[in-house]
Amino acid sequence: MASTVVRARSLFDIAIVKQAIVDSFRKLTVKRQVRNPVMFVVYVGSILTTLLWVQAVVGKGEAPPWFIFSVSVWLWFTVLFANFAEAMAEGRGKAQAASLRKARRDLQAKRLTRSGEHDFDLVSASALRKGDRVLVEVGDFIPADGTVVEGIASVNEAAITGESAPVIRESGGDRSAVTGGTRVTYTMTPLAFVSTLVQYNSSTSSFTVNARFRWEYRPGSELFIVLNEQRDSRASGFPTLTNRAIIVKINNSIRL
């Protein structure tokens, strides 16, 4: 399988920083600044203080020129810094999107066949079509956007979000969507639950034990095993068994 690494870019990538500096000055237009009401007020204040500074230099100002100049510089710095931060975010987003598009072209996918649950053909990610099912194992990159239909895994989405902590993606529910170009760090077996309840009735001196096992071996398909026991503790020695029941229930989803 071809190995394509999608890395999260550095916060201060030189190419992105240079472009962001240029864009921070390009954004000094009324059309761009009015989109952000808060920064637009600062933008107008910067223009007014600049005019007041010119008035103080060539004529008589309301305050010393150096004071008006320092206020104007700080206001312009605030506007430019806001533009720079916005341009940096845009640049990083565009760079990550381009990196993911390139990764999707280079990645290979384990497309499952109909002959077996884990039998697959190795194909290019660009050859995948809607409805194809792929197998993604530990260390593999997810070849395309899709939905988890079976299993649960931890996915590293740093290439998209910049967050280093992996996230859980599992079949069913609202955490099943995955993005192409992200990487599976580890996987877990289908869900299994075990619970036990022990009760004592002092009026009858009896114990009741309830043990339950639930195995979700496939989305919508589950196996339930329930064990109920009742024992009488009035006799000497180990409590005597008075009743026992075992219940088995199977739910199996059928794909039509």
Image (cartoon, rainbow, N blue to C red):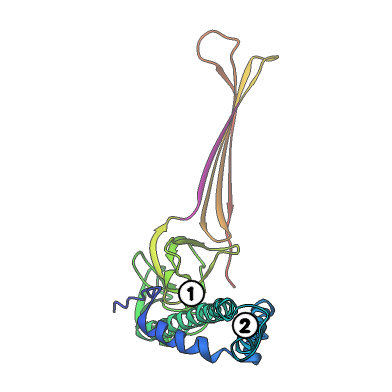
Q: Which residue is mark 1?
A: 179
Secondary structure state at the residue bearing disc 2: helix
Q: CA distance from mark 2 to mark 1?
A: 43 Å
- Label 2 sits on residue: 46
- Tell me where the magenta segment starts and ends, as one range: 190-198
In percent of width and height, residue 178 lies at 50, 71
Quadrant where the C terminus is found in the figure: bottom right
Residue placed farthest to the front in the image? 60
Q: Amino acid at mark 2?
A: Ser
User: Where does the image place residue 69, in percent across and percent down from the top left?
Assistant: 56, 80
- Looking at the image, is 211 positioned above or below residue 13? above
Quadrant of the image occupied by residue 19? bottom left
Q: Quadrant of the N terminus?
A: bottom left
- Rate crowding at label 2 as few (under 14), some (14 to 19) or many (20 or more) other CA atoms within 10 Å: many
Q: Farthest residue toward the top?
A: 236
Q: Earlier in the sequence, mark 2 or mark 1?
A: 2
- Of residues 67 and 157, the one nearer the viewer is 67
Q: Residue at x 57, y 9 (%)?
A: 235
Q: How many marks?
A: 2
**Could you tell me which residue is drawn at 45 percent across and 69 percent down?**
162
The residue depicted at 52 percent of the width and 45 percent of the height is: 193
Residue in view at x 58 percent, y 60 percent = 220
Residue mark closest to the camera, 2 vs 1:
2
Q: Circle 1 sits in a helix, a strand or a loop, which is it? A: loop
Q: Is 100 positioned to the left or the right of 77 in the image?
A: left
Residue 144 located within the stretch drawn in magenta:
no
Instruction: Give residue 127's position: percent from left, percent from top.
Output: 42, 87
Nearer the observer, 117 or 37: 37
